[in-house]
Image: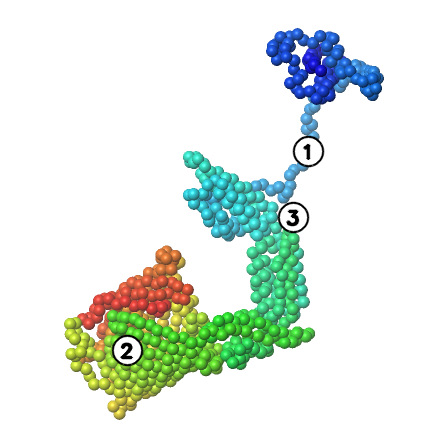
Amino acid sequence: MQARKPTIPVIAWQTSRRRKLAAGLAAIALLASEAAYAQSQNARLEDLIPDEAVANPDAWAAEGVTPEAQAAELAGPELEADSPLAELPELSVPWPDDTPLPELVELTPEDDIEFAELDPQVAPPAPELELRQLGPSLAIAYPTTAEDFPPRDDFLARFEALSSIEEYDNADTNVAQLAARARQDEELLNTLLRIYGYYDAQVTRTIGELHPGEDKPEPRGVRFDIIPGPRYAFGQIDLGALDTAPDAAALRRAFEVTTGQDMSSDLVIEEQADLDRMLGETGYAFASIEPPEFLVDHARREGDLTMRVDPKGKYTFGEVTSSDPAFLPSRHLARIARFEPGEIYQRSLSLDLRRAITATGLVSGVTIAEREVSPPSGDQPGVVAMDVNFTRAPVRTIAGAIGYGSEEGFRLAASWEHRNLFPPEGALRLRGVLGTREQLAGITFRKNNFRGRARVLTLDAYASTLGTGAYEARTASLVGTYEHLSNLLYQKPFGWSVGLEVLATSERPRPVVPEGVDPDTLPLRPRETFFIAALPLYALIDTSDDLLNPTKGFRLGARLSPEASRTNSANSFYLRSQVDATYYRQINDRIVIAGRGAVAAIPGAELFDIAPSRRLYAGGGTSVRGYGFQRISPVNALGERTGGRSLVEGSIEARVNTPWFGGALQVVPFVDAASVSTDVVPDFSDIRIGAGVGVRYLTGFGPIRVDVGVPLNKRADDNWVAVYVSLGQAF
């Protein structure tokens, strides 16, 4: 079928509403007719456009639409005779010309209308914000006044430490990376705000220039604006079965969280630890605490806390049992423990026992399990046994060392040790030294935790040949000590030692060797043999904060050794005594000042009735640095260092932390001085001073010390410089 020319309805502007409406209805009907016809014939839009319209659109449009064509279009397509739409009833809708329309009336405002005021508690005014830049690409704005955001300082420090932008910020960061980290930091801020109890907080993230006005092609950073809003408070607090404990009131006081208090997740965690500690220290060996849960009510602005506690009854200590009685018997482990059967259970004492067993060095792993022997009954607590399970560690050690010193020459040392040859904790050690100045062979028996915790019995027998800067000695000795002193694992505020020493020694003084003189050409005095019995005593008060690297506190020690000596058929009785004091003070984060003083005297005998090895000397790495070991001494007419009967020493040094090696390196300038006199009362006739600088490398087991000292008033036989290497500070 040939496509018909579509008609374009023309609706003339009429003043009558009826004609306007009729024309509009006619246009709509005509368009609908064309669309229905096109759809019924499955015609395309291009098929509806006649060829003359394409050739000359202006001429075709000027022809217009004839009334016949318009009528034909309005009639629509011909229908089949049997079609339901073949005959349509006529519709006649009268137009309501006589219906009056109301005129528009201009409204006037009413002056007596009252508007409700906004409740400031519902929508308080936004606080004034203060901008703080945390890094090159990070800034945060928070309330200016502390009342609007009380934990702001702690909050900002915490956010800065955890911020992804701060951690990974560098010159290579692009915009996409910055945006991703900004989203992480926004989540972090919301989490931190909830931790501090701000559940209605608003955090606004802005990526752009932190400093407008600078010419930057890309955004420079991220700004967060924080409006914390009201801080929620704790509501109801449910601690489960805590009220069933016999001392529930004391336990509740240990958990210092109350209704109405500002909410804080950190506070709950801290107080949970305090409550757990209190339960463990007051007999509740099997108590349990479930993780805390919060139910936040935004209408009340409160959070209800539920933390279920089950005390499970109170207990006392029972027996201590060993998993390997042949190696470490149960009786020995009970002696190490700081508790007795029948005492109220304390978790800290259980942990202390575990540490003490580890400190023996005989085990590679240890666990302690609480085992219920009898349950609580009424007001009577139950009994819990301590089952100790451990694994044996290797107990044999072979060690050796080789070294050289400008004063001592070569030195080779070796030892063999079995630390549990005589169970429990009975060690046997064989040792030997071969060197330029010293030769030694010795055997030592050592019993740890003997007759009590951290008490050590030592029996030592040795024979040695020793040459120092002051004397030569050939000695055979037997020494026994019983002590309770600090060690690397346990620093004790008070330590003591008692002993018994018996020795025979053949000695003579060493002459001073002038510069350029062969020492073998100098005449030597004949040796004298001394038989000595001594009762050495020692006591120490220690308030310092570290055994090897103290920064504050003091130490005060005293040594007394009554001695009897026999030589050349003459008997002598004297008292060797010395008092040492050290003081440590931290000036700031970088500097620690340390000072040391010592006073010693030997009253009761003349100088030459005392063996040279028992007299007083100064000099060396723990005395006056810059001088050789025992080289500070009075010198007699024969050029011999005689030693003295009195001594005064003093040292001061500054331990300065540096940023080198990750802050592990210290620089330590020092000054030392000493005076040794032949009289019991110091006369300070000869004062020797040494000075220098050292370094300390701080390790996990203590500082490694290297000191370089020079004598400030050098004598002819003194070296120009001395170097000292050891573990730990000089004092």
Place residue 468 in its image quadrant: bottom left
The mark that comes first in sequence, 2 or 3, is: 3
Which residue is under mark 2? 438
Q: Position of residue 716 (x, y in %)?
A: 18, 71
For badge 1, the amino acid type reads: Glu
Residues marked 1 and 3 touching at CB (< 8 Å): no
Question: Distance of mark 1 from mark 3, alpha carbons?
Answer: 31 Å
Label 2 sits on a secondary structure element that is strand
Please tell me how crowded label 3 is: few (under 14), some (14-19), or many (20+) other residues with Cα within 10 Å: few
Label 1 sits on a secondary structure element that is loop
User: Is residue 495 positioned above or below 210 on the image?
Assistant: below
Left or right for 209, reference 576: right
The mark that comes first in sequence, 1 or 2, is: 1
Question: Distance of mark 2 from mark 3, alpha carbons?
Answer: 82 Å
Label 3 sits on a secondary structure element that is loop
Q: Which mark is residue 600?
A: none
Left or right for 92, reference 409: right
Please tell me how crowded label 1 is: few (under 14), some (14-19), or many (20+) other residues with Cα within 10 Å: few
- The N terminus appears in which quarter of the rendering? top right
Q: Is residue 456 visible?
A: no
Which residue is under mark 1? 114
Which residue is under mark 3? 298
Q: Position of residue 207 (x, y in %)?
A: 50, 39
For badge 3, the amino acid type reads: His
Residues marked 2 and 3 touching at CB (< 8 Å): no
Place residue 556 in its image quadrant: bottom left
How many marks on residues? 3
Q: Is residue 510 visible?
A: yes
Q: Position of residue 525 (x, y in %)?
A: 20, 83
Q: Nearer the viewer, residue 609 or 421?
A: 421
For badge 2, the amino acid type reads: Glu
Task: Determine the residue positioned at 42% across, 35% down.
Answer: 215
